[in-house]
Structures are given as structure tokens and as C-alpha cells.
Image (spheres, coloured by chain):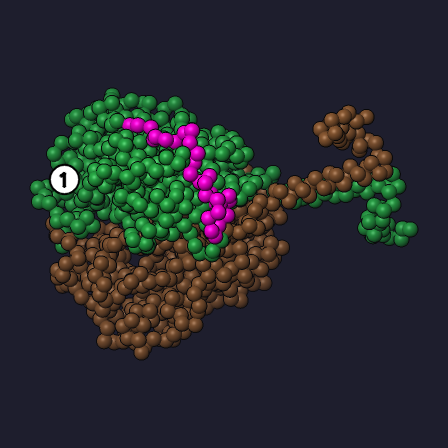
Chain colours: A green, B brown
Amino acid sequence: MEELDSGSLEPATQVDVLIVGAGLSGLTAAREIKTKSPHLKVMVVEAKDRVGGRTYTVDLKAANGKTDKWDMGHGRTMDRFDPKIRPEAHRRVWTDHLRAAHERKEGVAGRKPEDSSPRSADPFLERIQLESLVKTVNVEDLYDTPRAKEYDALSTEDWIRQNAYTRMVRDVMECATKSIYGIPSKRISFLYFLYYSKCAGNFEDLTECENNGAQGIKVKGGTNQISQRLAECLAEGELVLNTAVRDIDMRDPQNVLVHTMPTHHFNGKKPAEVELDISRIRCKRLLLAIPPNQCGCIKWLPGLPYLKEQLFASFPAGNLFKCIITYEKAFWREKGLSGEVLSSGVTEMAGEVMPVISGFDATTIDGNPAMVLFLNNEWADRSLEQRRSAVVRDLARFLGDEALDYVDYRDKDWHLEPFNGGCPVACIPPGNMEAFSHVREPIDLVHFAGTETATHWPGYLSGAIQAGYRAAHEVLFHMDNSKVEHRHLKGSVYDTDAGLPTAPDNSYKADECSPWPRRIVLYSAVAVGIYLYSKKYELSHTGRLLRPIERSVIKWWSGSTWP
Amino acid sequence: MEELDSGSLEPATQVDVLIVGAGLSGLTAAREIKTKSPHLKVMVVEAKDRVGGRTYTVDLKAANGKTDKWDMGHGRTMDRFDPKIRPEAHRRVWTDHLRAAHERKEGVAGRKPEDSSPRSADPFLERIQLESLVKTVNVEDLYDTPRAKEYDALSTEDWIRQNAYTRMVRDVMECATKSIYGIPSKRISFLYFLYYSKCAGNFEDLTECENNGAQGIKVKGGTNQISQRLAECLAEGELVLNTAVRDIDMRDPQNVLVHTMPTHHFNGKKPAEVELDISRIRCKRLLLAIPPNQCGCIKWLPGLPYLKEQLFASFPAGNLFKCIITYEKAFWREKGLSGEVLSSGVTEMAGEVMPVISGFDATTIDGNPAMVLFLNNEWADRSLEQRRSAVVRDLARFLGDEALDYVDYRDKDWHLEPFNGGCPVACIPPGNMEAFSHVREPIDLVHFAGTETATHWPGYLSGAIQAGYRAAHEVLFHMDNSKVEHRHLKGSVYDTDAGLPTAPDNSYKADECSPWPRRIVLYSAVAVGIYLYSKKYELSHTGRLLRPIERSVIKWWSGSTWP
């Protein structure tokens, strides 16, 4: 067994910058560092047997015996692409000027369709309230946001319960939350919910297909090709697959020593012939472009600062369980339906949950009809056959029985994906936003990328790329300072324009006292007012009500009995 | 590099039962299985270089140049001990009939002592309310608890904010939460808070030194000796230290294959000469007696069921930062003080947090005076010198300047401990209690112990032992059924007396609608009532207020102008 006394100067592969994670963020960072400073030796290690991380494109059988490509992972919003890398994108077709499918769903047995499947597009009063709260968030200085501390401790479900006027609004919010984060609203800090919306512009942009909406733009041929094109920028030996990081030794102030382990047995492949022993890699700067829950699984030497440790331990990934169903014809359009589906999945039967949360028309630019659906995680542990049949039957309730006659079906349960544990994004549970406010902070020689660290569309492709650029320029700041573009460092601790971030205000405040004393004074004043008013106008029947109290107060006060 | 195609039948060490984690829970299970079924081959692997897990006893310099032992980890409550193992225990001295120290603390500059350091022992109104809620919890069937779903989504801080009448109560609750869980109340699901209190009896038992209180009983010579005595029951080669589990392969329905890795470099030790290659261990039953966050760091093949995955990803460990200070004399007793300290740590200066949360007299049975203090995690990342000086100065505010003249100081920051990540217990954040209700459930051939899985004093020594017995008998249920004692299986899925657990009720309910429509009707009725009342008694000045509204309603209704 190899000896692992890692503080010593035993042989290790030496690089300048080691990047962990060959997703969009890590590859963007690698390419940026290589482009700006070609003399730096860069290496990217990836635990999976493929690049792309949470972007994952698969072939499905399509209409007329053809095959086409669909995204089983991220497939949404982008900008910030280098023109050389940018693939052809197109607007999702058939979203506007058509009725959403769920308008037709009256009369389904066992549920109240008008409640459990409301229209997402309907503006509702609470959205105005929500958007006005979103506007108050300061993305780069979280605790500058009004009532930040209070909203941090509040779960999003509690905010909705306290503020939604109708059941319909609560259902729409729950569907939206599950479709955006892959997690129910009770598990999300309301401050994170507001922050996430603000990073995207506003809450509407997260949910809609139109204008700047996240659901609007798709990539022709799938999003995975972006990572593949980025990976082509790396030379032979600069990208190593099937290699996970086991521990990170930061005890040497000049170098980071990383121990890796092979992961072939997870991918069912034999290990390739390795020319280079990379079980120990020593680097000058380490860039982690992996999800936060995976950072938490790495052993750190010495231990992490307290808030970073808390962040990694309390930043679980959501699980947006995605499914694609292809059809011979886009039969829903012939009925005048857009294909947009929204359902709470809840029925009047306790314990029963329908699989479909939401769905959209996913017809490709080549015209191969398909639906993309997001499924409830309650269906994660069923067999593929059970799931397929339930999903298709649920879809038929919305679009009609033609939905039963599909060409191909495929779903992906991201929680089973090793070295990932979920998709699309990690979410902060209530009470952890102070730790989150340190998400972009480097630790000594270690920098952090990944879509969760972005300030613009975190959780989306754009966010991954923004974070990749930021982390790359953080590394360049130390290794090749003349090449740094400061616009990429916005929102990081290297942002020279920004002041010190606002700390959460934990100081003792006299006005933080309970509202009850004030209420009691107010209610008493009102009662006294009513009493005096009644006396003045000699309203004896009101006075009679208060007479016993009046009498006992007088008695207690003066000791004498009052008539 | 070793090939790791683990599904195959390549050589591996074969045992009947592999137990991961040589804490109190794992060692109890090992001993129980060996005692009941001596023919079973048992092996315990432990990532640290010592047994005992979160119990950890150290030597400190004490009065008169002697040394004595104190607990830096768990040191509280126990029962269920086998008489052969049970060490000598004693009641914490000097807790009753003495004034608590913080009564004397008036006039400390920069804070409001009467608010920030209230007496813990004072009964307060909200405690009655809290205890009545604790009584409603069904520990073995969580969702049988009234309002379980609602309390799950609520953070404990929100419950306190909504229900505490005074700032003092909020401060006491916050100190208590931090001292019990090592985590602020905003990060804990209120349902978990109630559950945890119910498991201990009631909330008071968690906080008090007297009667059944958790703070009352200490072990002479430290709690670590319990684990050491348990470890002595294991034969040579049955306990392997410095070995962590890297991944668990459950694809074979008859065996579990476990890959381990050496951890010597974390403990700063050279690996011992290993006679046996234990990098691959095949076992018939696997028993995990490690904290849930560590279960989440293991890679599982195939992936975990969804709710288990969610549980491990959302069950972060608290960090009760403990410190022991020894003195020549118990000077506080001479002043008539018990030594009990309680402080919110908050001052009127923003960003300033005092280190001490709570403290007790920790004088040993041999009469060596000491104080045990629990510290705010804000002080975790400071240097030992900074911390020591701040802690001693903070303590002097409570006990007087004699506190500055200590003999020895030692603190332990559990978040830095590898293969642990915190102490005393993991806590469920809001919204995750449905996943938690599966905490004791085995997965195929894998069983779970550890104090978090207990139903009686989870988070304490007793809980670890109860869970160890339960998991041991779950294993015996399959491997040597005649030896099972069913009383140990209570609360597990093997409990034949218990029915199916109640599922969280997610069904559609008409009465779950918003209170607003009812409120609007009520407020309108009140307004109309006031108006009619004013009309009847010809109260023109009240009527005048309502006249414009009345006039426009009449106009809209009849079309004619009303005088």
C-alpha cells in the first residue's frame, strides 16, 4: 500500500494550475488561463468518464425512424459565450399565442383541476409583491438587503403560506420552485430564493419562455457540444477523465498537494493505460469547479474555515428529474395547445402523487416533435417501466390520449449520478445564507468556480461560464497579473471597486423586542376610547358591557365601591 | 495503480459483519454481535487513529501541580450500560442552591446584561407552550404528530420569533439551542427540535443539571474509557484503525463489497505493518455507525434511494465548540456562585460576538476545580492565543477577575476533526423531516447505527448505545435469528408490534385555503356594523367619515346621486 505522508516532498506530478471538474465552468476556466497565459501548465481532472458535468445530451428515436439529440441535463439560457465556441441556438417554438394545455383538463377524476393545475402565465397579485422583494436584493453584498437576516431563517414555503391569498397561487409557486430548483420550497431559504431570482433579473425570468425567460432558448444539437468544443482547446494529457479528488493538503504555503483516486469502477470501464502517475498532483493554484456538495466530500488538510465547512455541509443539490418523450406528430399543436403543462401532482387520495410537475414542447429545430417533462422525486425509486407508464398516462390527462402513443421515452435521475448527486443546482436551506455569502471566497491557494458561485444566472449555463471566467482571472491575478481583466472579477474578493461586504447585523437592538407590549397598549387604548365614546354619548348598552371591568378597576384603585 | 472493477470476484478480505466506525455505537454493536453469536466473523474499521468517535478525553494540568482528565467531546447522560462496562459516574457538583453566576453581571460595558444574560433556570411562560408541543410528538411515527408538515417547514428561530413574548426568552432559547446542538436555531427544523426534546423526555431535560437533566451526570475519568473497555472485547485483528471507507458496492445481492483507504496522513502517523490487505472487504452485512454527513461522503454503487440521499446530503453536524479551564481553587463557590453561565454573546457593537455561550462547574470527583464552557463558532477560525485570552476575559465578566488566573486551558474545535465534521449531533434543517423519518431504515444489506438514529436520547451517549444494540439485533435478525431480542428492535422497521408509519399527508384539501377571504368578510362586517351603529345613534362625525364611500356605493348601485 502506497505510503501517504503527504506533507513530505515525495514525487508528485507538478502543474501550475490544477482544475477539478471538466464541466462548463472548469473547462471555461482552463481555456481562459491557457489563452491568456500559454506558459502556465494547466491540468483538468474529471471524475466522470465524460466532459460536460450537468450538461448531458443523448440520442432518442424520433419521428419517421430518425434519431435526434435532446438534453437530459441543463438545456437553458446562455450568453457570455465566445463566438468560436457558441453553438447555434434557437428559441423554443410554439410557446406564444397558444393556449396552455392545462386549460383543458377539467373533469379529471380524483382531483380538483381548477386548483391543482393553474395557468403559470396568469399574473397574480403576489407576484408583484415577490418581484418588489426581489428588487431589494443586493447580489454582490447579500446582507445589504433589507430584512436579510429574517428572510434567511424563513423557508420559502413559509413565506408563500404567509403571503399567498389563494390555494392556486401556492400551487403555482410550488410547481415553479420544483421546476426551477428540483427541490420543494420548504427546503429553500427565502433569502436564497430572492437572491436566485435577482441574479436572473426577476422571478418571472426564471419561469417563462418568452423575452428573457430561462425556458426560452435551446441549443441545436444539445448543450454538451459546448463542453466538447471547450475540451478540444486542451492539449493531450491536459484533461484526465475517471479521476476524482480524494483529499487536498494545503499545509505547504507554496503548493497544494492533491491526492486523486481512479473511478473506473463507477463508470463500468477498465482503466486506460496511464503514462503518468497522477495519484499525487502538486500545484501552485487549485481551482475547484465542482458542485459544493462534492467539495464537502473531499477531505481537507488542515480543516476548512468554519463557514466554508458549514457551506459545503449545508448546500444539498436539488434533483430535477427530467424526461423526454418523442412523438411522430406534435399532436397537441393540432389541437391548438402550446404543450405547456403545470400540475401540483396532488390528488385527494393521501399518499398519491402524480409524476408530472411541468412540461414544455421540446420539438427540435429539425422538427422532431417531443415533450420535455419534469417529474416529482417521489417517482425516483420506481422502476423505469412503472415510471414510463405513469408519466405517459399523466401526460394524456393534459394533452389527450394521443400522448399514449409515443416513439421513445428516456428519463434521467441525477441523484444517482456519482460525483454529482443532483441537478440543476444546489440550494441553501433556511439559516445558512451567512455561510453562502462566502461562496466565492478563495481559501489560501484554492479558488472556487461552478455555477453556484455565479452572480449572473447561477444554476444555469451562463452562470457556470461567468464563474469559470471569474475563477480563471483570480488565478491569473496571482500567477500572471498583467493579463487580468478586472471586469471578470466583479463580485469576488478581488473586486477593487467594491467595499467591504456588509456583515449580518447581530448586534443588540432595543427595538428588536416583541410586538406584544405595543399591541397591548394599542388594544387597551382602543378599548378605553370605545368606553369613553360610549360614556360621552350615554350609550348605556355599550357601557353595560364594560361596567364590570370599570367597577373592579375603580375598586382596586380607590378601595371603594362605585355605583 | 490497482484495478478497481469491483463487481467481480477478485480477492477481498471476507467477513460476516463489517462495522464502520469505532465510536460508542459501532463498538456496542460489535460486542453485542460477538456476545450473542460468537461464530460470526466481525470486523470494525475506524478512520481515526483512536476509538471513541465523539467521546474524547484529555489530560489537563490541574490544581496543585496534578493532572486530571476532562472530556473534550461528549460527556453527558447515560444509561443502558452493561454493568461490566459501566464506569463510575457522578453527579455534577455544586449546581443547586447556589446563585447562578450571571445574576452578578450588571454593569458590563457595551451591552444590556439584564437582556443578554438571563437565568436559564427561570421558568417562563413560553416553556409551558413548548413542552405541551413536545408532548404531542410521536417519536416512532413522526408524521402522526399534529401539524408535523407545518412544523417541519418552520425554522426553530421562526417559531421562537412568533411565540416568544420577550427578548429575554428569545435569548435563552438561542443559548439553549446553541449549547444543545452546536448550531443556531435558524438552521434547525422546528419539528426536529420537538422530536429531539421528546426523545430526551422534554425540553427541560436537555437543558438542566438537576433530576433527569442532560447536564447532570459526568463520568469519572472521562467518557472515552467506555469505548476503550468496549474495544477490549474485540480480538486481535477485529479492530482496524486508520482505515476509512471510500465506496460501497451493493450490486451483489449476497455480499457488500467495501473499498477502504488508509488515513495515516490525516493522523500524522506512519502506517503500521499490515498483515492483511484490507483495501477490499467483502461482508454479508454492513453496519454503518458513523455520522450521517460521513455516510454522504461515501460513494454508493448503485446510488442510494432518493430520501436516503437527501437525508445524508441535508444532515449537517453541529459544532459545539467546547473548552475546559482549570483553576487552583473553585473561587466562584467561595462567592456563593454555582458557576452556571449563560450569555447571548451579543453586544451593542455590530459584528462583535463574545465567545462564551454557556458554562458549568466542571470540577472532577477528585476535587480538581475547572469550568467547562461552550463557545460561539464565530471564534473557530481565530488562533488559540486569541481565543484563550478572549474566553478568559469573557468568563471574568461573570465570575470575577479571579477567572483570569487559570492553570490550564484547552479547547477543541470539532469541525476541524477529519472523518467527523462536528459534534455533538447532526441537525435537520427545515423541510427535511420526511427524509429523516427513514433514518433507521436499512438499505438491502446495509444497516445504520450512530447516535442520530436513536429514539432515546439521540445525540448523547445513551442514544449511541441504544442505536448500537438496535443495529446489532437487526443484523442478528438475518444472520442468527434465534438470538434476537425484540425489545432492542423497537422503533425500527423490524418492530413487529408497530403498524405502518404514517405518511406525510400531501393530499389535496379544500380547507387548506387562505384565511384572507374569511378575514375580508369579517372586516367588512365590522365596518358595516360601525356604520349602521353610527347611523342609528345619528353620530354624524363618524358618519361623515364613511359618507364619501356610502355616496359612491349608492351612486354605483342606483345611478342616482344621494344627498
Q: Residue at x 44, y 63 (%)?
A: B501
Along the line of sight, which residue is nearer the eye, B539 or B127? Answer: B539
Magenta stretch: helix, strand or loop mostly: loop
**Residue A527 picture location, percent across and down:** 77, 43
Q: Is residue B361 above or below residue A286?
A: below
Along the line of sight, which residue is nearer the eye, A68 or B491? Answer: A68
Q: Could you classify mark 1 by the number of other residues whose Cα lies within 10 Å: few (under 14), some (14-19), or many (20 or more)?
A: some
Q: Residue furthest bottom?
A: B482
Q: Quadrant of residue A333?
A: top left
Residue A106 in the magenta stretch? The answer is yes
**Residue B65 picture location, percent across and down:** 38, 59
Query: In the visual, does B317 lie left or right of B191?
Result: left
Answer yes or no: is residue A491 visible.
yes
Amino acid bearing label 1: Thr
Residue A350 in the magenta stretch? The answer is no
Along the line of sight, which residue is nearer the eye, A289 or B241? Answer: A289
Q: Where's the C terminus of chain B, which quadrant?
A: top right
Magenta-tinted stretch: A89-117
The chain letter under disc 1 is: A
Answer yes or no: is residue B58 visible.
no
Along the line of sight, which residue is nearer the eye, A345 or B6? Answer: A345
**Residue B403 picture location, percent across and down:** 48, 51
Q: Quadrant of residue A176?
A: top left
Query: In the visual, does A25 lie left or right of A345?
Result: left
Q: Is residue A238 above or below residue A557?
A: above
Q: Which residue is mark 1?
A: A13
